[in-house]
Structures are given as structure tokens and as C-alpha cells.
Image: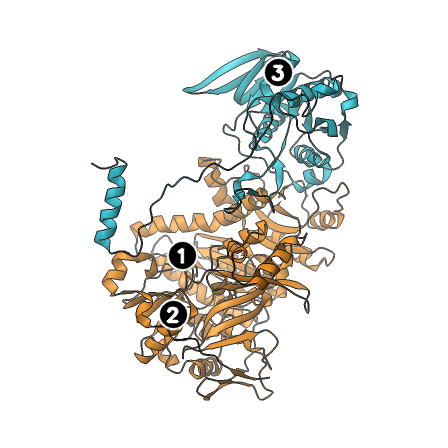
Chain colours: A cyan, B orange
Amino acid sequence: MKIVVCVKQVPEVTNVQVNPVTGTLIREGVQSILNPFCEYALDHAVRIKKAHNDVQIIAITMGPPQAKSVLLRSMELGADEGVLVTDRKFAGADTWATALTLAEAIRFAVPDFNLVFVGKQAIDGDTAQVGPEIAEILGLPQITYGIQAEINDSRRQIRVKQEVERGYEVIEATLPALVTFSKGEVVRRAPSFADVLRARQKPVRMVSANDLSIPEEKLGLQGSFTQVVKVFPPPAKKSSLLVDNVDAVEAARTIYQFLKERRFVS
Amino acid sequence: MHEVFTKTLPAVDIHQVKCVQGFEKIKAEYPVYLSDESKISAKPFEYLFFPKSEEELAAIVREMGRLKIKITIASARTGLAGGCVPMEGALVSLENLDKVEAIHYEPSSAEWRVVAQNSVSLKALEGMLRTKHFPHLEQSADERVRCEYLQFKNDPDGYFYPPDPTEMSAALGGSVVTNASGARTYRYGPTRAWVRGIRVMLANGEILDIPRGKYFASPAGQFVIWDSQGQAFSIPVPDYQQPKTKSAAGLFAAPQMDLIDLFIGSEGILGIVTRVEVALLKREEKVSVIQFLESDEQAIALTEALRSEKRLQLDFLEFYSGNALDLLRELQKHEPSTVGMPFIPQDAHAAIFFEMSFDSKSENLDYHILEETIARCGARLEDSWAGYESRELDRFKVFRHMIPETINGIIAERKKQVPGLHKLGTDMAVPDQYLPEIWRLYKEHCEALNLEWYAFGHIGNNHLHVNILPRDMQDLASGLELYQSFARRVVELGGSVSAEHGIGKLKGKFLRLMFPPEALQQMRAVKNALDPDGLLNPGDILPVEVAQ
């Protein structure tokens, strides 16, 4: 049984700062990491592998050559091999062109796949579109927002616990299928240092535009229906009031007025 | 050169300085200034000052000196020995002296250096270095400062400040006056090794600029300081021996020592450090590894093996005792995500946590020496956790801090039932060869007395924090006695009774175990020469009555 896990390299956004003068992101010192939701998807693949024999996990990523590092990371965490889909022609791809390229790369590199696992979204773009688009292109049943997954003994169906607004639903799909994953109750794995070292010995296949049967005009920027025109931080919210250098009575009066204007007190 | 001249600062009217007067008002409106991380409580004091400049600070020092009012200095109040908790007089918070003033390249030592005011926090400094974004330098009115900052930004390499006291909200200046250390002291030494210059305000309100390598004690063992009135103070350099291990106990002394070293680690009893210049190091990618082991004794053996394998360069070497892992396991049982890590393996009964250089992109990682060293101790690299992304390094650090945090939580709960209870945490270090012996002593005695105890900390420097958690007052009494006996043995072995927390107001009795009366008299002589009225940080290191 083969589980393809789509992974993406993203900037580690938790510590990203904005230059107050230029309003642009300060990129110095910002590392690239495996998108956390992709890590959860991989985690569920590893769980299935532990529960069943003969499961092979293939991590696939589309990106520049340095995106190989997320394949290494995925292999440290339990993937058996990696596929790096890289070509200058893929540059500037929006979600649709990315999904089209990844879907074709999966067909090319792992034609006998049984499952495709995807993070529900990437923490940089936050679109949550690529997973469902891949499912559409590959003609697969899809379950989104999964937080638990198990394969039945016949290995013909997957049962997924799905997050919905008011709780959970349990949904089954016939394989092959695609599942996108949320965080759920996953406690992130920590590979052993032996895993880290051995991951460097695992195979990584390269896939380029020439390997895929997609016309050039459907790739990258050319094949994109949308374009990012501008990136800017959200306007800073004025959420706090600092009352300083005044006596306690004046401070209380100011805070009371502040709360009253916002109808916290009458 | 052993003679140095002070400078005066322009006069500022003391009434311009922000001041809160009256203990009741301070207690009601500024309660956080009544204690620090030691959790000891202040005794009534009259003034709380917030100077915004060295000139304002000088005005406070001169005025308090005139009125013979003693001053306690505080920065971030993260100390564990109560050093900045006032017992009388005035508390001066340096928290507004929080600007980085310059970053420049020093060709003579081929290193980048940061010049900063006292209260720049270590966390803020790390953030600015990581992003190479220093807002104050960008907006500096001084063109040279802006130019040097630009050079730094354009340097393709990243840099960091090596000392890493566990508490990163500590102030840089505070870490210098306490000679703070942390896990990475194992490779990089304590803060002292990274200080290239300081500016100190003496008890007379005048300033001394002390670059490293300029002022050394005379062969006869003294420094001479000339003030602006032409008066000379002779400072006798103590001649006692320092312990043969890392230490934050008492004033530093060495033959023909550098004047800067007298102030580093002096816990603010000799002068107020207002500005520091520290060196940076090129940032490298690191991997953190937590190696699980079968027993505490295997951890001791692995520590010795890793330390003696000179081909391995580890940044730090930390320890989790078996019972400390059990404590974390218990937390995980109740809430798996609390610890932020996967389940601790059931067969792990101790662990060693270390960090080393790493190239995550390399496909030919050769760590066979490490693997062989671990295998020789009967352990397997498969039984480990490893991480190298910055969020992973942070996660591992949080895991390390979980033990003391959990212990503090437990003791806080017990205190609600028995208010007199408190944790007993050792901070002692011994020379390398005595690690197995001191570990046996700690373990056997704690177990013999049936105390609840946990051990963790800087095993690479033979500096373990043994934390005893008394369940009742009887346990507390036994624990206190045991602590004293540990300290006596540590001193016999040539170690330090306080390897990193300092003496402050809490550990004077242990200092007296470590140094004979003549040595303490020499410390007192230094204090009296620089601060004849005992104005600065009364009660720290030396008891008040001795200092006067």
C-alpha cells in the first residue's frame, strides 16, 4: 500500500516581524520549515504504517531545489522516500497550477498510489485549496479537515474523523482517496538522531516539467488564474490603552471611560 | 596600568527623576518591585526610582549618598538569590536604560560587538540579532552608528551572543554583574568571557569606563582610582584562590587581574553597571539531542565519555535524573500535550541533553564518533529525540524547563497547606573528577532520608541542581541539614557553593563555608574602598554589619 503525502516548505511565521518603517516582512533569520499541517498529515500516514504491514510512505513536494530540505525532514519523521518536483517553469504557480502539477507528478512518480494525504492548508498562503483541487484533478473522493484516520482490514476503505463546526463527523471513503488534515490531538513527533542521520540515505527522486504531460502554458505563472499583486501586513489593531504617569484616581477614571465607550460597563 | 580616572556627568535636578515615595504607595501601586525570582520579600523601603539616563542615575546616587540612604539596584529582577530585593532605603530600577547603543566590528579581535545599556533583555538582544533589526540603531542620530549597523546588516553571516542563562528575560547588565551562566557555559564559558567593556557608576555618582585589557592590578596587588576631585582610592586585590570549577560565589580575584573582572560578578556591591560591550560569535546551525538512558549512573558514565572524547565539540551537556523523567511522565499521563513532546519512552530512566553543530542540508553527515561513544556506554542513538529547526530547538528547551517549572508548581501548592515550606535547590559544582562521587553522595543521602527529590542541570560542568521538595517541616529541617553537608563536601572537593545563582541575600552562610574569614575580610576591604558608606546593594554577598 502506498500513501503519498504532499508536503510544503513554508517560512516559520511565528517569529516574523514587520519593519515598522517600510511595512515589509523582516526575512533575515526566518527559517524555512515543513508546513505544520503537512506534518500532521505525515503523522497520520506514519500511524497507519505502524498499524499495517507493507505500507510505503512517499513524501512529495513542489518547489525550488532547496525545498528538498522538507523531504529530508519528512523522511526523518517516517517517510520512506521523497519526490522533488522542481523546474523553473513551475515558478509563480497559484493554487490551481500547483495542484495540477502535483497531481500529474503523483500520477507520474507513484502511479499505483492508494491514498493521498495533504495538510488542510499551508501557514503562509492559508488558502486550503490545493488539497481539494488535487482530488478533483485525480478524480478522487476527498475528506477534508481530518483529525484521525484508519484503514479497514480489507484495505479498501479509509475511515476519517472530520472536524466540523459543531463537533465531529466520521466519514468513510473507498480507496484511492485523498484526505486533508487539521491538527487534532497530534503531539508532534521527535525523530531520533539515528532517524535524522538515516534520512540522508533514503532516496529522493527528481521530477521536472519534461516528465509531466502538461502543456507549458498550464504551468507556473502562465497557467495561473490568480496572481499575488501585493503582500502587506494587516493594519495593527489598537487593542490596548496604557495609562501611565497619572495618579490612581485619574487612571481609574480613564480606564472606566475607555470601558464605557466600548460598552463593557454602563 | 593600575590607575584609572573617573568622569563626572552633567548635573540633573533630582526632582526631574521619576520617583515613587512611601512604602505604602509602592506596595499598593508597584507590588512587583517587592520581590524577584527568589520570591523573598522586601522590607519597608522609602523610594522607588526610575532613572531614564545615566545623568538621572548619578543625581539619585549623589542625593542618596548625601542623605546616607542605601540603594538597591534592580534590572529585570530575574535573580534567584534576592540580590535586587531591597531591605531598606531606596530601590533604583534601571529598566528604562534599555537601548542598544551600537554594533561595531573590532578588527583587533576580529569580532562583532554590541554596546548596550544595562536593561536590554537577553531575549530582545537575541531577537534583534536573529533578524539583524535594531530599531534604535536604524534611527540613531549618529551617522557612524548607522554606518556600522549597516555594515553589520550587510555581513552575510548571522551572529549570536553565546551566554544563555535559562531566564532569557534577564537584563544584559544584570547578567554581567552576576556573571550569569547557563547550559552553553559548557562550551563558551560564563558571561565574563564575553564582556569586552563596561561603564560603572561608583557610589560617588561618577563614572568609570573600563575596557577589557587596559587596567591591571599592580604587582603589589592594587588598583588606584582617582575621582574628579583628585582624591585617590586604593583598592586592594584579594589574594584568595578561586574554586577549580565555574563559580558565582563572592568577588573574583586573581594575581594582576583585569579591573573589569572585579566588577563582573560583583552583584552590584561595588558599583552600578550602566553600559556593557559584549562580543558576538558567528551563528551556526545546531542540533539538539536528548539521549535516553537506562540509569542515572549510565548518564554519569556517558557524560564522562562525551567529555573526554576531544573530537566531539558539544555546546552543552545537561542531565535529567530518572526521577525527573518520572515526574514529566506523570504530567504526560494526565495531559499528553503538556510537555510538548512525544511520550517519554517507558524504558528511559535518565537522559542526557546535548547540542552540537550540524548541517541539516548535508547528505553526508558523519557522526560515527558520537555513535560509538554512546554505544560504548551501552546506549543506542535510536533511543533519542533530535531536532534542529529553531522551533524544535525551542521545544527542546521548553522540555528542559518543564522540570523546574513543575517542581515550583508542586511546592507552591504545598505552601498553601504549610506556608513555611520552600524548595531546597542546590547550585553547587565540583571539579570534573568528582562527578561520580558527588552524584553518589546526593543520591544516597536523599534516598536514605526518604526525601522527595529530583536532579537536573548542567552535568557537563558537574553542576547539578538537586531539588528537594519537603512534604512537611520535618522534611524541610532534614533537607536543610543535608544541603549544608552537601556544601561542606563540595568545598572539600575544591568546588563552588554557588556555581551560577550568586550569593545575594540568601547564600551568605554558604559563602562562609567556602571562604575563610580572612578571604571575606579581603572582599570587605574591596567593598569599603569603593563604597565606604556601604551605600550600594546592602546585604548582598556581605552581611550589612560586616560591610559597614
Q: Hey, which quadrant is residue A150 in on the image?
A: top right
Q: Residue at point 59% right, 71% down?
A: B244
Q: Which residue is mark 1?
A: B423
Please identify, in this view, whether the residue under mark 3 or under mark 1 is nearer the observer: 3
Rendering quarter of residue A96: top right
Q: Name the spot of residue B408 as percent of width and height, x first.
A: 41, 51
Q: Nearer the viewer, residue B360 or B462?
A: B360
For badge 2, the amino acid type reads Glu
Mark 2 lies on residue:
B56
Horizontal side of residue B59 vs A156, given as left or right? left
Mark 1 closeness class: few <14, some 14–19, many ≥20 residues within 10 Å: many
Residue in front for this viewpoint, B503 or B10: B10
In the image, what residue occupies the spot 44% across and 49% down?
B405
Q: Nearer the viewer, mark 1 or mark 2?
A: 2
* Residue at the right extreme of this rendering: A210
Same chain for mark 1 and mark 2? The answer is yes
Q: In this orientation, which residue lies closer to the viewer: B540 or B27?
A: B27
Which of the chains bears the disc numbered 1?
B
Residue B85 in the image, given as x and y percentages of width and height: 36, 65
